[in-house]
Amino acid sequence: QVQLVESGGGLAQPGGSLTLSCAISESITRFKSVGWYRQAPGKQRELVGTIFDTGPTHYADGVEGRFTISADIGMKKVYMQMDSLKPEDTAVYYCNARELLRDGSGSVYWGQGTQVTVSS
């Protein structure tokens, strides 16, 4: 069973930074993409950013230029550096890994989430 464990959340001041980590129990190369999602109270879970197996990254409009996703294949970790944090970034952040098998099928795996609170 694939396990994803997020860490690095906490309290940050507006304009501050945090780095989230997603530790994956399997080789990252197994997955088509690894993404970060977030869910604020009373809101739907939304995609924050994704890193694809071939290397490219994609970010939601609201975090483009502030958040950076990277992967360490040897450590089996995916990171998200969050800079210039805003109160509206407050949410529970989840790591998500998607596999894509040759027949087009594949499973999606989720971590348990880590709380990020941006407040002065």
Image (cartoon, rainbow, N blue to C red):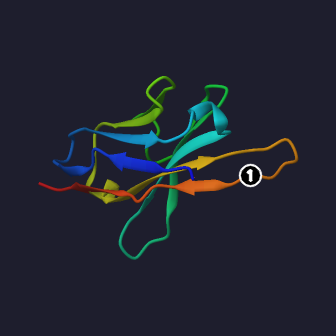
Residue depicted at 47% across the width and 29% down the height: 70
Q: Is residue 20 above or below residue 72?
A: below
Residue that carries the numbered disc 1 in the rendered image? 106
Residue 21 x %, y %: 37, 40
Task: Count the numbered circles shown.
Answer: 1
Q: Is residue 2 left or right of residue 98?
A: left
Q: In this view, does 5 lie to the left or right of 96?
A: left
Number of residues whose C-alpha sits closer than 10 Å to that of mark 1, classed few (under 14), some (14–19) or many (20 or more) = few
The residue most toward the top is 74
The residue most toward the front is 1
Viewer can see residue 92:
yes
Residue depicted at 20% across the width and 47% down the height: 14
Residue 47 x %, y %: 53, 53
Quarter of the C terminus within the rendering: bottom left
Amino acid marked by disc 1: Gly
Residue depicted at 63% across the width and 31% down the height: 29
The residue tagged with tag 1: helix, strand or loop? loop
The residue most toward the bottom is 42
Q: In this view, does 8 lie above or below 47?
A: above
Using the image as rendered, state which of residue 72 and residue 58 is in the foreground: 72
Residue 82 x %, y %: 33, 39
The residue most toward the left is 120
Q: In which quarter of the image is residue 23?
A: top left
Viewer can see residue 60:
no
Residue 48 x %, y %: 49, 49
Q: In this view, does 95 lie above or below 19?
A: below
Q: Quadrant of residue 40?
A: bottom left
